[in-house]
Image: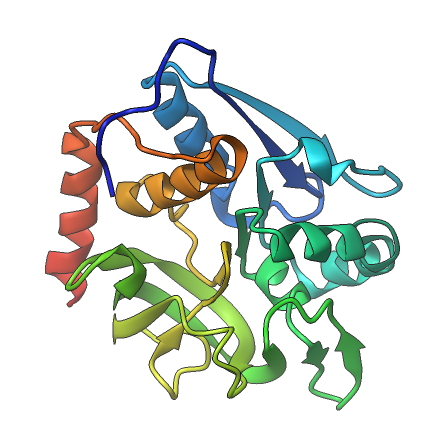
Amino acid sequence: MIATPLTTEKKVSLQLLHLYPDLLNLYGDRGNIIALSRRCQWRHIEFTIVQASLGDKVDFSTIDIVFMGGGSDREQTLLFQDFKAYKGPALVEATEEGLPLLAVCGGYQLLGKYYKTQEGDEMPGLGLFDAWTEAGKNRLIGNVVARIPLLGPNITLVGFENHSGKTYLGSSETTVPLAQIIAGHGNNGQDKGEGAIYKNAVGTYLHGPILPKNPAFADWLLTKALERKYGKGQLEPLPDLWEQKAHQSVVKRFS
C-alpha cells in the first residue's frame, strides 16, 4: 500500500468533515481525527477540519474524508431528522462517488437500512450499508481482535466495543464485513463479522479510538482520500513504533 510518496511540487491538502461532534461524541472517538491529522502533519500534508451539526448545511464537494462518532439512542433520535433531510442524501451521493467515510457505533447504525427498538418500532436509516440493527437486551462489551482482509492477509484490527444494538448485514455483495472476529463480539455476537464496508465507506463498532492503534487502517483512509482527490495516494512510510506496540499489546492479551 505504501510506495513512492506524492510529489511535493504542489501542496497536498485534505479536508475532513466531523459530523455532529456535539452529539456523537462518546468514548473519545475524536481521537480518530487527531490520529489522521498527526499522520498528515508528519508527512507535510495540510489537514483541515470542519464541523457540521444540527441546522448546518454541507457542501460535500469540498470534503475529502467524513467522520461520525457514536452517541446514545437519545442523541441519535435528536439528530436523525436533520441528518436525513439536510446531510444524508448528499453524503450518500458523495460516498457513491468514492468519498472515504468512517462511522463508529451510533453513526454506523444510522447508515444502515433501519434501527429496530425493543418495542418493535423502526427508525429508518440512510441505507448506505445493506445492514440493519435491532436493539438487544444485553450489551456487547469488551476488547476486540479481528482480521481485516482489505489491508492484507493476517493483518489484525483491534479496538473496544460497547453496544446493545445488534447489526446484521444483508446478502448483497456490495456491503461486506470490515473484519472477521478473532476475539470479541462484533456486529451481533453471532456471525463473527465486525463492521461493514461499502466502496470507501466504513462502519464499525470499535472505539478506543480505533485509528491510533491501527495505523495501517488510518493510512488506508488517507490513501483513498488522496486517490480520489489527486489520482494517486502513495504515502511516505512512518515508523509507527508506539502505535504497533499498542496494537500488539491488545493482540497478545485478548487473542
Residue appearing at x 62%, y 52% in the figure: 97
Q: In this view of the protein, which residue sits in the foreground, 212 or 227?
A: 227
Return the x and y of residue 22 as percentages of the image width and height: 71, 39
Q: What is the tally of numbered marks visible in this picture?
A: 0
Q: In which quarter of the image is residue 79?
A: bottom right
Q: Is residue 148 in sight in this rendering?
A: no
Residue appearing at x 51%, y 88% in the figure: 171
With 3 as the anchor, is 225 left or right in this view?
right
Q: Quadrant of residue 252?
A: bottom left
The image's colouring method is rainbow
Q: In this view of the protein, which residue sits in the foreground, 119 or 227?
A: 227
Q: Quadrant of the N terminus?
A: top left
Residue appearing at x 73%, y 67% in the figure: 126
Q: In this view of the protein, which residue sits in the foreground, 236 or 101?
A: 236
Q: In which quarter of the image is the C terminus?
A: bottom left
Q: Is residue 108 in sight in this rendering?
A: yes
Residue appearing at x 51%, y 74% in the figure: 174
Return the x and y of residue 212 as percentages of the image width and height: 33, 39
On screen, residue 83 above or below 205: above
With 93 as the anchor, is 240 left or right in this view?
left
Find the residue positioned furthest to the left.
252
Return the x and y of residue 72 as percentages of the image width and height: 66, 60
Q: In which quarter of the image is residue 254?
A: bottom left
On screen, residue 99 above or below 125: above
Return the x and y of residue 203 as percentages of the image width and height: 51, 61
On screen, residue 13 above or below 134: above
